[in-house]
Amino acid sequence: MSQTKKHKVMKKQFFKPVYALSILAVSTGLILGSCKKDEEEPEPTPEPTPEMQSSTYNYEFNNGQVVASAAYDGMHMDNLTAMMEVEEVSANETMISVTLMNTVDGETYMIHAHDAADPANTPNGTPYDETPNGNVFTQMANGNGGDVTVSQTVSMSYSSIVNDYEGFFVVHDPLQTLSTVDISTYLIVGSFARTQAASNLSSMTYNYDFNTGQIDPSYAYSGSHATDLGATLKVQELADGTSRVSVSLMNSINGETYMVHAHDQADPMTTPNGTPYDETPNADVLAISIDGNGMTAYNNQISTMSYADLTSNYSAFFVVHDPLQAIDTTDPTTYVVLGVFAG
Ligand SMILES: [Cu+2]
């Protein structure tokens, strides 16, 4: 809403009370002073200086949008996103601010502008200069478990940043050794200060409670693990047709290692021990361990199966084995979580 329009609305709302409470017109008049001024000047005041320009660019997590074969592959949760604000400060100065959402507490994120380059001329065939451009953006953000913002004022015009500068915006993973060659270590990568094309990559999250026999009453957990453990399973579509399968365990026990598996459903008539599933986990879908930390613990893997297959066609059980007793794949009462995979 323009300033003028806003004032007209305010005028309408305040008109009657002002009339009725004319005794209080002195004080009320002061409050409405700025509005009255607009009414008294029918001609719009010409802008003395052009308004400062600004724009905002949103970046999704690296699921292979820029380089399909190089979706992020590592231990960081894939809910991290970034927002870049480019604001004109003066004719030759621009402020660039980057906000990271869903950061990991205590980790330091390297956030860089890498100039685009001809891969034929770079040492390792990268389509960018591996040395970040400190004249555009080179900042570190300290993760706090939530949103963090870092800013840099650069000696370039607004237009040269948003129209002329050709580079990549990169957020490096703080949970692994910094690599400027391996794009699968980038949490975020996209063209710098440009609107990113819509990726339309799908994801779905499934919640699982502790195993109290939801699949079969005779499978209800029996053991000493606290029953407040819960799990979420997330399937994220990646640009090359594969998927990232992520698991979070809530209220995990610190120091215990949880085996987390997809076990393909099977006809019990055909399995060695009459189980309604294959006792060997499906390593192409989910066979990971999660280190318990006393709170929410996390791990993930990339599956070659497509998002559509995993969420619609694949028939398996999602199993979290009890770390407090020996693994027994024939005995579902040792499973702290048991549910239909992506069901
Ligand atoms: Cu298993």
Image (cartoon, rainbow, N blue to C red):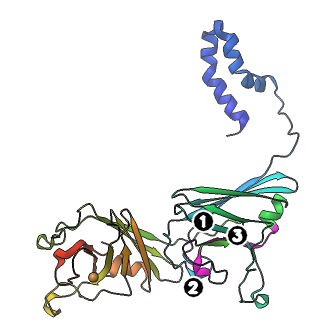
Identify the amino acid type marked 1: Thr
Identify residue type, mark 3.
Answer: His
Figure check: 271 above or below 133: below
Disc 2 residue crowd, few under 14, some 14–19, many 20+, Cα 10 Å: some
In the picture of the structure, the residue carrying the numbered disc 3 is: 112
Image coordinates for residue 336, horizontal then vertical, percent: 24, 71
- Please tell me how crowded label 1 is: few (under 14), some (14-19), or many (20+) other residues with Cα within 10 Å: some
The answer to if 173 sits in the magenta stretch is yes
Regarding residue 245, the answer to whether it shows in the image is no
Which mark lies nearer to you, 2 or 3? 3
Start-end of magenta stretch: 164-186
Tell me the CA gap for discs 2 and 3.
Answer: 21 Å
* Residue drawn at (69%, 30%) of the image: 7
**Picture disc at residue 33:** none
Residues 216 and 136: in front is 136
What residue is at 68 percent from the left and 11 percent from the top?
25
Q: Can residue 94 be seen in this view?
A: yes
Q: Residue 69 carries which label?
A: 2
Query: What is the quadrant of the N terminus in the image?
Result: top right
